[in-house]
Image (spheres, grey):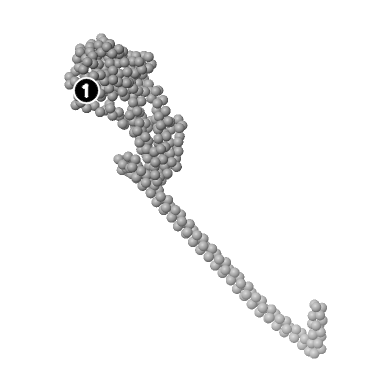
Amino acid sequence: MEGCWVWIIIFVIVMMLVSYGLAGTMIIIAVLGLIVLLILGIGGYFSFKNTQAKEREALSIQHEEKRLRDQREFEEEQKRILQFREKERMLKQKRLDDEKQLLSLLEQCGGSFAIGQITSYLQSKSLSWEQRTNYLEFYLLQLLANKVNEEHIEVLQRKRKQGVFTDDYGRTISDKWNNDLVYYIKKVFLDELFGQCDRINGYPIKETSVFQNRVLGEDDENIKYWSGFINNTLDINPDEVENSYDPNITGHDYEQYVAELIELAGWAVLVTKGSGDHGADIIATTENNRIAIQCKKYNSPVGNKSVQEVFSAASFYDCAFGCVVSNTDFTTAARQAAAKLDVPLLHHEDVTDYFTTLRNQFEANEPDYDNT
């Protein structure tokens, strides 16, 4: 095909040479070349313009796509920001609701007296939400612990009285009480505290770290913490019997009061009949040991007659010895007789401590009756 076109062009040139001569043929070829160049130039121009238009269109499309993509990214970012803010708002609201619920639970569990103090503390401290929540959850757990201890406060008071005494060297011995306290915490307190937490409705106290560490834990550190907590509770809740003395009670009621004080020290007591008691108002017994006690509620110092009567009563009731308990002081004669007859003279405020120490000495087979 290409060879055919070549022969056609040669034929045309030959015909032009025959018809117009060399000069005319050259002119015609030049004109035709210019026309071809013009056509090619025009075609190239329009091709260039078309290419530019396509490039501009492609660039415009790219810009539009980028604009749309940026807009979508912006909208998505705004959506994420709004979602984040909404989550933050909901989380803050939940925390406020939880805090409000915790304060309500604190009030229900007997902490209403401290709500103002707690609120002021939370407002005065730069605490994180987690720290605020932990503080309130821990306070709630302590209130629940107080509820448990209130059920056993009298036994705990008595056990501590019985288990703590001072030896002959002036040292405070509390081994028995410490053992009793560990037993109480492991076998009674933690189980009942779990039950108290179980009865909390609407708040997941059992899912908190405070519950996991302080209720489920039986490690030495946790036992030590609750031991200190219970001892502090007993310190701020002194024994009701010891602190219920009424100066206007009768002599018979005073005997009952002293008997209760001795019972706190772990002794069995028998209050004798008002008449024919042979000088002993109370017989206190622990193990195989018996003590005769005469009680005197006087407005003036007690004389030596009471010392002599309880000394005789001790022999009558087969007691190790006798002692006199009073709300007042003793005369010089009474103290002299007591020293000679080994009869302890006690104020009722000292009764529980004295009989606690005495019981421990009996258990150790080291009696020491002299307390004049």
Is 338 located above or below residue 1 in the figure?
above
Q: Secondary structure at mark 1?
A: helix
Q: Position of residue 223 (x, y in %)?
A: 43, 31
Disc 1 marks a residue whose amino acid type is: His
Point out the image quarter for the C terminus: top left
Give the residue drawn at x 35%, y 23%: 162
Q: Which residue is most to the left?
A: 300
**The image quarter in which residue 12 lies:** bottom right
Point out the image quarter for the N terminus: bottom right
Give the residue drawn at x 34%, y 40%: 109
Give the residue drawn at x 28%, y 20%: 270
Give the residue drawn at x 30%, y 18%: 284
Q: Which residue is most to the top?
A: 340
Residue neighbourhood size for the residue with mark 1, other residues' Cα within 10 Å, grouped as few (<14), some (14–19), many (≥20):
some
**The image quarter in which residue 140 lies:** top left
Does residue 18 appear anywhere in the picture? yes
Q: Position of residue 10 (x, y in %)?
A: 81, 82
Q: Position of residue 363 (x, y in %)?
A: 37, 17
Circle 1 sits on which residue?
A: 252
Q: Is residue 246 left or right of residue 151?
A: left
Total labels drawn: 1
Is 333 located above or below residue 194 in the figure?
above
Is 208 located above or below residue 289 in the figure?
below
Does residue 169 appear anywhere in the picture? no
Q: Nearer the viewer, residue 361 or 97?
A: 361
Q: Position of residue 134 (x, y in %)?
A: 41, 41
Q: Is residue 327 left or right of residue 27?
A: left
Q: Is residue 221 left or right of residue 327?
A: right
Q: Nearer the viewer, residue 18 or 43?
A: 43
Q: Which residue is most to the bottom?
A: 19
